[in-house]
Structure formats: structure tokens, C-alpha cells
Image (cartoon, grey):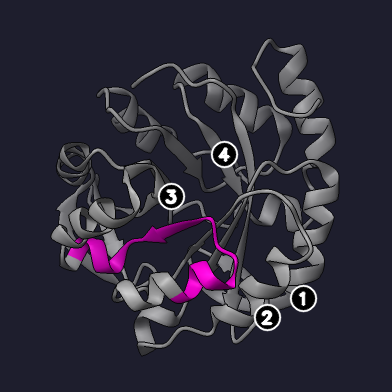
Amino acid sequence: MSQIEKIRIIPKLEIKNEFLIKGQQFEGLAKIGNPIDFAKKYYLEGADQIYIQDIVASLYSRNNLFNVVKEISENIFIPITVGGGIKDLDDIKNLLNCGADRISINTKALAEPDFIRKINEIYGNQFLTVSVEVRNINGLFYCMSNHGRDNSNYQLKDWLDILDKYKIGEVIITSIDLDGSCLGFDKELISEISNHEYNFPIVYGGGLGEINHVEELLKIYNFSGVSIAAGFHNNKIDIKNLKKNLHKKGYNINNI
């Protein structure tokens, strides 16, 4: 993987019916607030990007993100990546019209990898993020679709090799097993990732609940950023303090 210029701090907002929600391991979802309010808060604290995901859209073939994305884009001035339920090019066009800067796909990519090529041809490869939601099943890491409910039968290393051929802009890898736990990153998953080199930047998410979790993670692999939900929502990590600490450790961080 090429050298990362600056490490990005990316709050993740998981949306269901226009409410911000959170659970653990993609289950036990509970409403925790208004996503617009949280987006504003994280923007003011120094977030580099916001990642918005409708976590049930792919299950029910709907997309309720448009109003949320529009209002967030009118109130913050950092890049917004949006995913969840994107099934065709019209969905992408509509999200862009609402203010999205980048698009994230998972279920659609796993079902139809050539959709990645279609997006690249129209928008360029830097426009697209592929979300990779991973579960450990009997010691092997599998890529899951439909917000962790269905096994795609792609093992992580095989799917990343396929993605490497498409020259995509970025991959966000989330550990389902540690999602929402704030107990630290998935060490076995990180070991799996770090055994290979890829031509796209990788953002990691899952289990990050303390500043030292992020510091230890970045010692192991040259991630382009971290995606954090519960750690921020539950006030376990403060974005300003996280950035200050990473800067002191010698990491290249935006807006110190």
C-alpha cells in the first residue's frame, strides 16, 4: 500500500429510519439521537470525514438516507461518505444531489463486482469506497452482506485481492465481532490484513473505545484512517484529544 499522507478520523453514523442507532455485533440496535446533531458535534470537534450508513436499507430494498444526507451536508463542511442500500446508478446520483461526496457499497459489490467498474468509469476510482464487513467463522474471516446477516462465502483475503484489481479509492474494513464493544481492535483480523500489501488505502473500524487502542492499531499497519461509532457516541474518545495524542506520537494528522 502506498504511503498515507494523513490519517483521518472518521465518525460513523449508523442510521435506521432517520435515527442514529448503535448496537453490538450489528445486533441489539437502540436509538441514541439525531444524526444531524451528532454530525455537527463531530465536525466542530475536528472530524476529518463523516461516514453515514443506512444499516437496514439493503435488507428492505429502500433508501431513507436522502433527507439525512441533505441536512448534514448543509451543516458541515468536511467530506461525507454515504452507504447502505445502494442498488443502482440512480441511487448514487440521488445521494450526490443530496450532498454526498463519496459512496460506499458492500452488498451490491459482493453480489455484482462488475458494478464497481461501472462506477469507476462514470465517477473515477477515487470516488468509491467499498465497505467490507467481516466475521470470524471457525477461524476464517468471511465477508458478510446485508449488514452482517448473510455470508457472501468470500474469504477476506480473496475479496481484497479482487478489489485490488479494480483500483478503487478506499476500503473500510469493519470487525463485526468487536463492533460496538469498545474493547479494542480485532488483533487476528489485523494480522490477516497486515500479511498482505494492497494498492488501495484501508480504514479500520470495530472495537476502538480508547485512545490507546488507536495508537496500538496504527503501530501495526499503515491504515489511512479509523472509523469509530460507539467510542465517540459514548464519549469514551474525544476527537480533539485523540488527534493531539496521535500528533505527539509522530503521526501525520489533520487540523491539530
Q: Residue at x 71, y 67 (%)?
A: 72
For label 4, the crowd category at 10 Å Cα-Cα, with few meaning under 14, some 14 to 19 and many 20 or more, is: many
Side of 120 where 28 appears, left or right:
right
- Magenta residues span 94-110
Of the 4 image quadrants, the one containing the N terminus is: top left
Mark 3 Cα-neighbour bin, 10 Å: few <14, some 14–19, many ≥20: many
Position above or below: 70 against 100: below
Question: Dot 3 lies on which element?
Answer: strand
Q: Between 189 and 90, which is closer to the camera in this rendering? A: 90
Return the residue at label 4: 226
> What distance separates the C-alpha of mark 3 from that of mark 2?
23 Å
Which residue has dot 1 on it? Answer: 34
Q: The residue under label 4 is which amino acid type? A: Val
Please give the name of the residue rendered at 64% of the width and 55% of the height, measured from the top-left corner.
229
Does 108 appear in magenta? yes
Q: Position of residue 147 (x, y in %)?
A: 39, 70
- Disc 2 marks which residue? 19
Q: Earlier in the sequence, mark 2 or mark 4?
A: 2
Q: CA distance from mark 2 to mark 1?
A: 6 Å
Q: Position of residue 227 (x, y in %)?
A: 57, 46
Between residues 169 and 35, which one lies in front from this camera angle? Answer: 169
Residue at figure coordinates x 36%, y 83% from the top left: 59
Mark whose residue sits in front, 3 or 1? 1
Which sits earlier in the primary sequence, circle 3 or circle 2?
2
User: What crowding class fits label 1: few (fewer than 14 Cα within 10 Å), some (14-19), or many (20 or more)?
Assistant: some
146 vs 204: above or below: below
Q: Is residue 191 left or right of residue 101?
A: left
Tag 2–tag 1 contact (CB < 8 Å): yes
Q: Are marks 2 and 4 in contact (CB under 8 Å)?
A: no
Q: Are discs 1 and 4 less than 8 Å apart at CB?
A: no
